[in-house]
Amino acid sequence: MAYYLNDFSDAWDFALEAAELGEAAGAYVIAAGNYTIIAALAEVWKCDAEAAALYAAATVRLAEKAGHESLRLAGLGQQLWVAAERYDLATFGEARAKLLARPRHDQFRETLVLAVADAVGFGWRNEFSTAAAALAGLPERLLASNADHALRQGMLGLIAAATGDTDRARTLAREALERSVKPAGVEPIHVRYHRERGRLVAAATCFLIGDIVRGRRALSSRFDPNKQLLSAIHSNGIDAEAVPPLFRGWAEFINAAYRSAASHRPPVALTPAEVAVLSLLPSGMTLAAIAAELGKAPKTVQRQVESIYAKLAANNRAQAVERAREAGLLR
């Protein structure tokens, strides 16, 4: 009850005491059920990757002792999710194999967890078509909230960008950002956690396709108050060492998508002089100011800008800047 009232300190104390007493008394079902609560709190409240992994493993261990299949599945789902977030490849593989070893009813929440984790894992291996299939096959009834939809749409948008479909990536990223706006009223912490993951992946997609303004807006101070994520992400990927431990797996997924997208971009052969002009286009400087900055004649800069537009298949400055970022020519 304390968990759903957002009284997380009491929830942690009550659940931990009940789990430890239950385990000592051989009441493994009670202990395993409470360890699921502790594992969830360790992840979404304390943001403690090690503790989340430890308590998820305890859930599985005690559920297996009790022969309680639904608690076992819940624990495996938590193990898989935390391993995906931590980029813990060994635990990820073990938990996934156990989840797949026995049939599950599609109504189980673990079906959603498995699909999302699978998509992340396939992304790590640059298998983005398979990642898309894992998400596309999810039954709609399992997407219980806007947060779930935001997470799936954000991931599908990043996957679209990874495979060179910029238009679809833009559409899906915008849908994910719309669905990940903070709702009015009290929001369950696990729902908020999914919503924020969806928003971050959508923001990464915006940076990847050159929609930098929208990406920065998505990572506003309301969402990323310490600018930890905004400072880590850029047009070439995300600094996996600068993100929290429970985001390392997402960072690896994002970076794999960025590398894949780069392989799908057509080569753009700009001359060194055109590159110098291109680097100043985002500044908003007039062509005359750019000419003065580079020590060139205005007519020369005008010709070079026209050449840049032609090579990038752009009709104006804003489009040229966006496509240059998509091609990795600008940060």
Image (cartoon, rainbow, N blue to C red):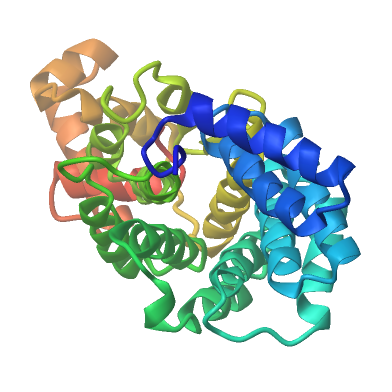
Quadrant of the frame with the C terminus: top left
As drawn, the residue found furthest toward the front would be 25
Give whichever of 81, 242 is nearer the camera.
81
User: How many numbered marks appear?
Assistant: 0
Q: Is residue 115 above or below residue 297?
A: below
Give whichever of 46, 216 is nearer the camera.
46
Quadrant of the frame with the N terminus: top left
Give whichever of 327, 139 is nearer the camera.
139
Q: Position of residue 74 (x, y in %)?
A: 67, 62
- Residue at 90% across, 62% down: 65
Q: Position of residue 181 (x, y in %)?
A: 22, 46
Res. 308 visible in picture:
no
Give whichever of 265, 271 is nearer the camera.
265
Q: Is residue 129 above or below residue 245?
A: below
- Residue at 39% across, 50% down: 191
Relative side of 11 to 42, left or right: left
Res. 100 visible in picture:
yes
Relative side of 215 to 6, left or right: left
Indicate the quadrant where residue 276 lies. Answer: top left
Q: Position of residue 59 (x, y in %)?
A: 77, 52
Relative side of 304 to 235, left or right: left
Q: Position of residue 186 (x, y in %)?
A: 24, 40
Indicate the quadrant where residue 175 lies. Answer: bottom left
- Residue at 15% across, 42% down: 184
